[in-house]
Image: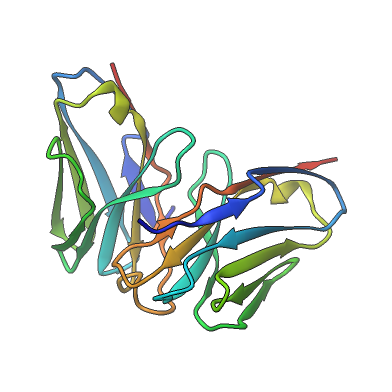
Amino acid sequence: ETGVTQTPRHLVMGMTNKKSLKCEQHLGHNAMYWYKQSAKKPLELMFVYNFKEQTENNSVPSRFSPECPNSSHLFLHLHTLQPEDSALYLCASSQDLLKFRGAEAFFGQGTRLTVV
Amino acid sequence: ILNVEQSPQSLHVQEGDSTNFTCSFPSSNFYALHWYRWETAKSPEALFVMTLNGDEKKKGRISATLNTKEGYSYLYIKGSQPEDSATYLCAFGGGADGLTFGKGTHLIIQP
């Protein structure tokens, strides 16, 4: 069992659909992150949560809406996406925020999203 | 915008050979430099987190060095094995809550 679990692993959605990505961590970590990887681009930070509070929104369009009900769960709600939003969405967690020396990120396997 | 560059983008290495690749990052406002290994269909997995100039870390046949003053880190793999085939990511921690990643070096070990 991996420490960080993401569901679903694959998702195809239409531009008018609403869907949600789920991330769950079993590591007792306090910080959780959403990253996006588009083709031929590096991992891009989207959102950061620490103790359920959002601490960073990296200029992400409002069609992506994160939710962190508790320190173990993180959601990414998707609505009216565009084809260019097709990408791999990775969730990660860390004991403390990654800006603190020594903290390391634990990643899920990602959700491969295709917007049609 | 922070710039984290990795080179080369991809690398083919014969089994048994040693190899190394580079990560360059901003030399100001340094907090940490991370290396992750990302195998196909798996999660990225932390190899090293380095925080001090001159740090050298080792895990089995893999080692890394850090120069924060000039803004670069090297990852070395000694005696490459097929299971070393993966994408190696470096990530810069500059005080923001998250990390800034490079595009990675895609390593293929040929038997």
Q: Quadrant of the N terminus of chain B?
A: bottom left
Image spot of residue B52 (x, y percent):
53, 83
* Side (left or right) of A98 relative to A30: right
Image spot of residue A88 (x, y percent):
38, 37
Image height of B35 relative to B41, above or below = below
* Side (left or right) of A1 relative to B40: left
Image height of A13 relative to A40, above or below = above
Return the residue nearer the eye: A105 or B54: B54
Q: Quadrant of the C terminus of chain B?
A: top right
Instruction: Residue at 59% x, 68% y: name it.
Output: B72
Image spot of residue A96 (x, y percent):
31, 74
Tally of numbered tags: 0
* Side (left or right) of A113 relative to B108: left
Image spot of residue B54 (x, y percent):
62, 83
The quarter holding residue B89 reads bottom right
Instruction: Residue at 39% x, 59% y: name it.
Output: B2
Colour theme:
rainbow
Instruction: Residue at 41% x, 63% y: name it.
Output: A105
Return the residue nearer the eye: B14 or A40: A40
Instruction: Residue at 29% x, 67% y: name it.
Output: B97
The quarter holding residue B12 reads top right
